[in-house]
Image (cartoon, rainbow, N blue to C red):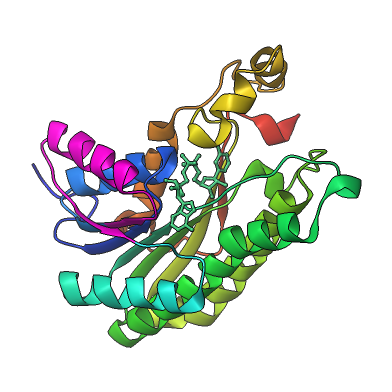
Amino acid sequence: MTDWLGLADRPSLVMGAGGIGGASAVALARNGARVLLVDVDQEHLDAVRRDAKEAGADLDTLEADLRTPEACRDAVAEAVSRLGGLDVFLHAVGRNIRKPVLDLGDDDWSSIVNLNLSTAYWSGQAVGKVMTERGYGRMVFVSSVSGLLAHPHHAPYAASKGGLNQLLRVMAREWAPHGVTVNGVAPGYIETDLTRAYLDKDGIRENLTALVPAGRLGRPGEVADAVTFLASDRSAFVTGQILFVDGGRVLV
Ligand SMILES: NC(=O)c1ccc[n+]([C@@H]2O[C@H](COP(=O)([O-])OP(=O)(O)OC[C@H]3O[C@@H](n4cnc5c(N)ncnc54)[C@H](O)[C@@H]3O)[C@@H](O)[C@H]2O)c1
């Protein structure tokens, strides 16, 4: 098989072994990348490793809680040490708390902004140092349609994703001269652990599906396909972009 994507042997760090991060890690590994996958949940890591093996690939794992600057920097340093460098980085950790603004507690706000946005900044900064020195890099952050749309009961989540979009655009501008591209994928409604319980509530799946021009929810593998392109050599002249993977949701 030819390496059309230019991913073979690329040292790659993926943060987040959930539905989207897991599918993306497997897709990168299937295309020949050497992947270190990081998550706080060892069961998620083991499950993705099994999926990779079933797909005829393999990946390395690291259990870590990424909620501090030190933890993010340590994970990046561990990736550089285990993989011998870093060409590809995917940030796919995130959480949502659904409450009206008036019901939000201080911890609701800070915990979502910390996990969704601050970990992206801390790890992106550490990865950026490595990639700009080497003169090559592909960074991808998982944003959301919530970075653009004003869904009720999504205040900290929407603010963190809007902030993430601007963070990655500034990184993209600063690091473009060094051969480093920085992009985001913005999924619509994808069925994963993040959304499953909510989608299973009475009428929610039907109501949300009705808002998607494609007439269905998305699959993690469809987000992974977009990540794979942005992580590949084929996207060399694409930077600072947010690629919506949403079946047309933001058109409505
Ligand atoms: N599923 C969707 O519909 C959807 C839509 C838009 C955006 N997103 C975004 O995609 C990204 C991934 O979401 P997902 O759907 O795969 O969710 P998921 O819940 O399946 O995965 C999230 C992963 O993050 C890990 N994690 C949580 N806290 C952590 C911590 N402190 N340290 C390390 N790992 C931690 C979890 O263990 C889990 O494996 C998130 O940024 C989310 O906001 C998801």
Residue 112 placed where, x, y %?
Answer: 65, 56
Seen from the viewer's position, the closer of residues 184 and 199 is: 199
Whether residue 165 is visible, yes or no, is no
Give left or right: position of 234 versus 33.
right
Q: Is residue 182 left or right of residue 57?
A: right
Quadrant position of residue 160 = bottom right
Q: Residue drawn 14% across and 60% down?
A: 9
Q: Is residue 133 magenta?
A: no
Residue at 57% in and 17% down: 216
Q: Residue at x 73, y 48 (%)?
A: 148
Q: Establish if 139 lies above or below 56.
A: below
**Left or right of residue 93: residue 207:** right
Taking the magenta stretch, the answer to whether it contains residue 61 is yes
- Tell me the quarter of the image containing the C terminus: top right
Q: Nearer the viewer, residue 110 or 140?
A: 110
Residue occupying image coordinates x 57% and y 31%: 195
Q: What span is colored magenta in the figure?
A: 37-63
134 over 219 or under it: above or below? below
Question: Furthest-right residue in view?
Answer: 102
Left or right of 177 in this view: 233: left
Q: Is residue 231 above or below residue 87?
A: above
Which is nearer the eye, 25 or 172? 25
